[in-house]
Amino acid sequence: MKSPAKAKAAPQVGIIMGSTSDWKTMSAAATILDEFGVAYEKRVVSAHRTPHLLAEYASDAKSHGLQIIIAGAGGAAHLPGMAAAFTTLPVLGVPVESKALKGLDSLLSIAQMPAGVPVGSLAIGEPGAKNAALLAISILALQDEKLRARWEAFRAKQTRTVLAQKL
């Protein structure tokens, strides 16, 4: 007799990006979330080309079970800030590297949010996407003991790895 397939967990994290080209960067967040067993969804939601979709997505995110939004954007990088304007969930902004200014424009756009509409600003590119996922995990781990144990084991392993290095 076959055992029933394990039901897919409802996503806790939404990964959104302004275009499919941003997936090259944002897939690093998905990889980390997969490694920790954190369910997520991914969508292209453009602040400029699909503003109504963005408003709907961010406004409904909490009622759909999401707890955190990771938003990656390049250039003008309005996506994280606009998502934060439509939700009370934590929004973590990942500046995607742009051709013109190497992502500095994106970083400044995400970091310079007006007081009262917070966005957690991460590093430019893949390191920022990875850290956005790790920050999301650390937030979720506050309420999830099993995830907290995996998070603490990850951090302890990092410490052991550094301490074991020889010069």
Image: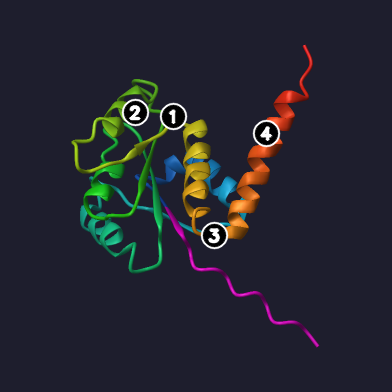
Q: Secondary structure at mark 4?
A: helix
In the rendered structure, find residue 158 and report the number of the disc placed on it.
Answer: 4
| Nearest to the observer: residue 48 or residue 156 | 156
- Indicate which label's residue lies in the foreground, 2 or 3: 3
In the image, what residue occupies the spot 50% across and 37% down? 131
Q: What is the x, y in percent for residue 55?
A: 23, 57
Disc 2 marks which residue? 107
Disc 3 marks which residue? 144
Q: Secondary structure at mark 3?
A: loop
Q: Are marks 1 and 2 in contact (CB under 8 Å)?
A: yes
Can you say whether 50 is above or below 73 in the image? below
- Identity of the amino acid at label 3? Asp
Q: Secondary structure at mark 1?
A: loop
Estimate the spatial distance between the alpha carbons at disc 1 and disc 2, rounded to whole Å.
Answer: 7 Å
Estimate the spatial distance between the alpha carbons at disc 4 and disc 2, rounded to whole Å.
Answer: 27 Å
CA neighbours of label 3 inside 10 A, class few (<14), some (14 to 19), many (20+): few
- Indicate which label's residue lies in the foreground, 4 or 2: 4
In the rendered structure, find residue 123 and report the number of the disc placed on it.
Answer: 1
Q: Are marks 3 and 1 in contact (CB under 8 Å)?
A: no
In the rendered structure, find residue 6 and report the number of the disc placed on it.
Answer: none
Q: What is the x, y in percent for residue 68?
A: 40, 53
CA neighbours of label 1 inside 10 A, class few (<14), some (14 to 19), many (20+): some
User: What span is colored magenta in the figure?
Assistant: 1-14
Pick the quarter of the image with the C terminus: top right
Going by the image, does 144 lie left or right of 54?
Answer: right
The dominant secondary structure in magenta is loop
- Identity of the amino acid at label 4? Gln
